[in-house]
Image (cartoon, rainbow, N blue to C red):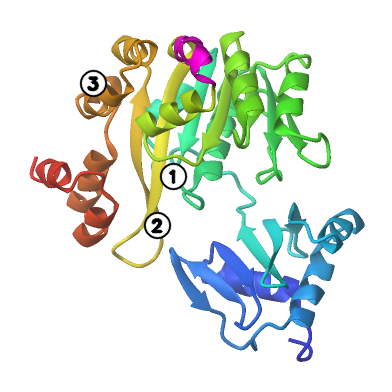
Amino acid sequence: MSNNNTIDINQILDEVRAMGASDLHFTAGLPPIVRLHGNIKKVSGYPDCTEPIIVNVINQITSIKHKQTIQKGLDADFSYVSNSGHRHRVNVYRQRGYHAVAMRLLRNDIPTLKDLYLPDILGEFALKPRGLVLVTGPTGSGKSTTLAAMIDHINREKNCHIITIEDPIEYLHNHKQSMLNQREIGVDVDSFAGALRAALREDPDVILVGEMRDFETINAAVTAAETGHLVLSTLHTTGAADTLDRIIDVYPPHSQGQIRSQLANSMVGVVSQTLCATTDGKGRVAALEIMAATDPIRAMIREGKIFQIPSSIATGRKDGMFSLDQDLARLVRNGRISNELALSRCQDPAEYKRFLQM
């Protein structure tokens, strides 16, 4: 702090990064807040934020274009690189008439699938020549990091053209075995759907869509996956069945038979994840559900029997599949997370307890 009306954003970002925080928040009436290993915590040594303090923070991190957006009372999403060279995903919004800021602290290095303790089948999904791979879960569950690791795996292992469409760009990839072009919404292109349509004219092999937010984007992504491209994207859903239902439900009833057929033909897999605090209090670990699009799974999608998919996942270990409850039980048996936490996150307590005893 230089005085009561300013916070040096680069100084506090370096401080909270050293703490191991994943997010930094500025909101009126509280000192700066971090998310540390999943929990909310006040940053010591700073006063409660006022509107002038928050506006000063915003002015330190925004371009003229984003300042104009914020002055119109609109939310703004963008990335910020601190003086120490670290990247951050930023959202500026308003609440109760005041400005607020949420900043996600990003790693400069791109973690590998092995670094993240993710199963080998994610690498297999990433190297498929075509189809649709979805990574799902609630906000803050590590979806973007998992996708970045999958894109890096392709980049290391395959000679191809990768296009990413992001809002904003979170991880900066270098060209390795692949040629990799990253497009940012609001900077390089106007919308996900527009960028997807344009991507099909840009000779891609792999397309990463940061988020399938609306019908247009979902429809364009499925079409791209059907026409010989590998498409990776995210949805804020929990579990493969919920994910497939969500996609199908955005289509009008008369088109749902067609989209079920398209998904049955194009789906590669669904990875659903949630982050759980570890028992040592030093971090978080992902608990996963993995669905691979085996022939029986494809038939269930095509025939509208999506409600049968969870039981197929639970009995599909030989195909690399497992349920969230199975993975939570594994993490508890290995001492990574507590039984109490697993019970709060599981989908079926009775099934979870059965898996725990296996």
Magenta stretch: residue 312 in it?
A: no
Tag in front: 2 or 1: 2
- Quarter in which the C terminus is drawn: top left
Q: Relative to the observer, which residue lies in front, 50 or 278?
A: 50
Give coordinates of residue 202: x percent, y percent. 78, 17
Most foreground residue, 97 or 50: 97
C-alpha distance separating marks 1 and 3:
22 Å
Mark 2 crowd level (few <14, some 14–19, many ≥20, 10 Å Cα): some
Q: Amino acid at mark 1?
A: Leu
Mark 1 sits on what residue? 116
**Image position, residue 73 (x, y; %):** 80, 61
Please state which amino acid type lies under the numbered disc 3. Answer: Lys
Location of residue 259 in the rendering, given as x and y in whole percent from the top left corner: 50, 14
Which one is earlier in the sequence, the residue at label 2 or at label 3?
2
The mark that comes first in sequence, 2 or 1, is: 1
Please give the count of numbered marks on the rendered protein. 3
* Mark 3: secondary structure: helix
Quick one: quadrant of the N terminus?
bottom right
Q: Quadrant of residue 158?
A: top right
How many other residues sit within 10 Å of disc 3, few (<14), some (14-19) or many (≥20)?
Answer: few
Q: CA distance from mark 2 to mark 1?
A: 10 Å
Q: Which residue is mark 3?
A: 318
Q: Secondary structure at mark 1?
A: loop
Residue at 64%, 24% (x, y): give it: 207
Residue position for label 2: 284
Q: Residue at x 69, y 58 (%)?
A: 91
The stretch of residues the image draws in magenta is 252-262
Mark before the other along the chain sequence, 1 or 3: 1
